[in-house]
Amino acid sequence: MVDKSKYEGRPSTGFFKFLALWILWSAGIGLVTTVVLGTALARLGSTDGLQLTSLLMIAGEIVIGAIALLMLSRWQSQTIFKKTGREIKRWAMWSTVSWVVGLLLALIITLPILLDNQENVFAMIGVLGLGLAIIYAVNSAVQSWLLSTHIDYTWMYIMVMVASVFFWALFVGDPRKIAIGGLVAPALQGLFSGITLMWLFHLSKLGNIAIKSKNESV
């Protein structure tokens, strides 16, 4: 186990405050992701989806989404620091870059499926789910890499983030539920990912205490 016992600051936020803020930022990120991905797929799936005007509008929406992601990710980083005393360096920058890469990859992979199943509503919903899974897989993998310098077993964080995409499925079938799900689903994802993060930080702290005790007894 790597020694990760050095803290850059003193924790100043309690568990429940951290969790509430983490849920808030996660809901915001999920809403932005769902809107940008859904809008891009709708434009690309239309008859003039590959026209220059549509492509420019999609590019503009991705830029706006990336700016929003940068701000929300920066608040995420500050929330982690206030709870754990750990500064996750370049969290906002790499989270935003990975989000854009994941979004573009999701569009490349899902667009052919969308074009072949435009008459199938459930297939189109499945395409959105697949796109979300791809975005969160790329995004959480990069965040896991950033976290790995501070805590162990960060692959669990990736699993929770990707598996939590299934929360969106709870709101499929009713347009009103889908609109609500755009906020509730990522909020639930934030709940479970936040708990997982705190658990991993706690495990790392216990491991470092054990290493320190072992070294002192030698």
Image: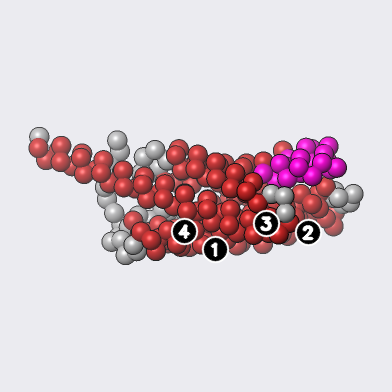
- Which residue is rendered at x = 47% and y = 49% of the image? 192
Numbered badge on residue 22? 4
Q: Amino acid at mark 2?
A: Met
Q: Which residue is mark 3?
A: 177
**Secondary structure type for disc 4:** helix
Residues rendered magenta in the picture: 110-129
Task: Decide which of tag 2 and tag 4 comes sooner along the chain.
Answer: 4
x, y percentage for residue 203? 31, 43
The Cα–Cα distance between marks 1 and 3, rounded to whole angstroms, is 27 Å
Q: Nearer the viewer, mark 1 or mark 3?
A: 3
Give the percent coordinates (x, y) of residue 166. Answer: 59, 44
Q: Identify the disc placed on residue 57.
A: 2
Dot 1: few (<14), some (14–19), or many (≥20) neighbours within 10 Å? some
- Residue at horizontal 89%, vertical 51%? 48
Vertical order, 47 against 81 (above or below): above
Q: Which residue is mark 1?
A: 71
Question: 104 or 89, which lies in front?
Answer: 104
Q: How much space separates mark 2 and mark 4, taking CA atoms?
A: 31 Å
Q: Nearer the viewer, mark 3 or mark 4?
A: 3
2 vs 4, front mark: 4
| Between discs 3 and 2, the one toward the N terminus | 2
How packed mark 3 is, by other alpha carbons closer than 10 Å (few <14, some 14-19, many 20 or more), is some
